[in-house]
Amino acid sequence: MTRAAVLAGVGAALPPRVVTNDELAQRLDTSDEWIRTRTGIRQRHVVDPGTATGDLAERAGRRALASAAATSGRPARADLLILATTTPDRPCPATAPDVAARLGLGGIPAYDVNAVCSGFLYALAAAQGHIAAGLAEHVLVVAADTFSTLLDPRDRTTLAVFGDGAGAVLLRAGEHGEPGALLGLGLGSDGTRADLITVRAGGSARPLRGPGADAEVADGDRYFSMIGGETFREAVLKMTESSREVLGRVGWDVEDVNAVVGHQANLRILHAVAEQLDLPTERLVANIDRVGNTAAASIPLALADAVDAGRLSKGDHVLVTAYGGGATWGAAAFEWPGLAPAPADS
């Protein structure tokens, strides 16, 4: 029988600086009420200059390893690290090998995955494949983004929505019937919707410097942009469709789901997905009000928050789903294994 990928630990990291809606309102044409009514966000965490994505990824990964050790009572290890991020420390090389080295994991394989806000699910699928193929026993999946480094300082819409953060899970090889095993996972993409969520300039198609540089790049094309209305509709549609697909694959009815951890993009999107699935909103796990949209990090960060708050119980049926740039989307289902939170000093 093919080996299963089993959740063994979870952790998260946020930069200490908190930016409230009122602080944004002091320098932009916005207000706390405008932001809260449209997004459900009241504050977000933002990195200070000198703090990079890799710094947050290291902290989240360390806490996931500590959670696994506290859960099992044995030291935790990883023989593969996959980092989901759209904001790597450098264009080249990948950030994952540096994070692995800083965690003291030796010369294990490590690589980055970029599927924007769906990145955690894509990394989860890759980890599952490595375990099923017998290429790894313990995989540390980290999702970290510092979207504040991509945002136009004059754009009230994106500044209100995005925050910085990291989340991580440790997966181990196990059996399909045990709690924590990934029961079903589905992914999708549509490259024709690439302009919905994008940074138009700075890649090889429109370099900002060197041979072939585009001297006519508009200032706004250097920053992250999003077509809000279409993104909202597509996110609700694809998160709902992928959730139904995975529920059907694992044989769960909607009534069987105890908790839905959706990508924390917008509270209205989460509520719309719950409505489409005919699921009570009380079953939504949400922390967007405190952290904003942390891109790839949002699902594992919300899981870690739920563990710290005692929101999830062993045996709970958990559904996770996301939509991101690319466009990309996906969902996964598992039975919660009852993980211990990372110790406060980890």
Image (cartoon, rainbow, N blue to C red):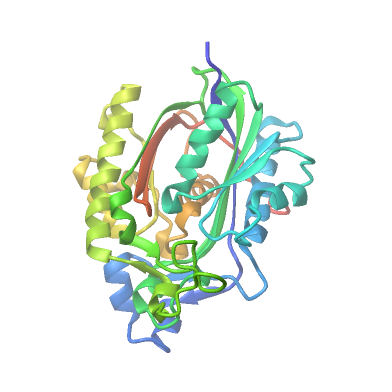
| Residue located farthest toward the front when viewing the structure as drawn | 211
Q: Nearer the viewer, residue 180 or 198?
A: 198
| Residue located farthest toward the top when viewing the structure as drawn | 1
Q: Residue at x 38, y 67 (%)?
A: 41
Q: Is residue 127 left or right of residue 74?
A: left
Q: Is residue 48 left or right of residue 121?
A: right
Q: Residue 337, image x and y in percent?
A: 53, 30
Q: Residue at x 33, y 83 (%)?
A: 30
The image quarter in which residue 74 lies: top right
| Residue located farthest toward the bottom when viewing the structure as drawn | 26
Is residue 4 shown above or below 170? above
Is residue 339 shown above or below 198? above
Q: Residue 226, image x and y in percent?
A: 33, 66
Q: Residue at x 54, y 61 (%)?
A: 87
The number of numbered discs placed on residues in the rendered structure image is 0
Q: Residue at x 33, y 87 (%)?
A: 29
Is residue 164 something that shows in the picture? yes
Is residue 256 something that shows in the picture? no
Q: Nearer the viewer, residue 335 or 100?
A: 100
Q: Nearer the viewer, residue 153 or 46?
A: 153
Q: Residue 38, image x and y in percent?
A: 27, 68
Is residue 112 shown above or below 136? below
Q: Residue 113, image x and y in percent?
A: 53, 46
The image quarter in which residue 166 lies: bottom right
Q: Nearer the viewer, residue 310 or 341?
A: 341
Q: Is residue 220 left or right of residue 213?
A: left
The image quarter in which residue 247 lies: top left
Is residue 325 shown above or below 317? below
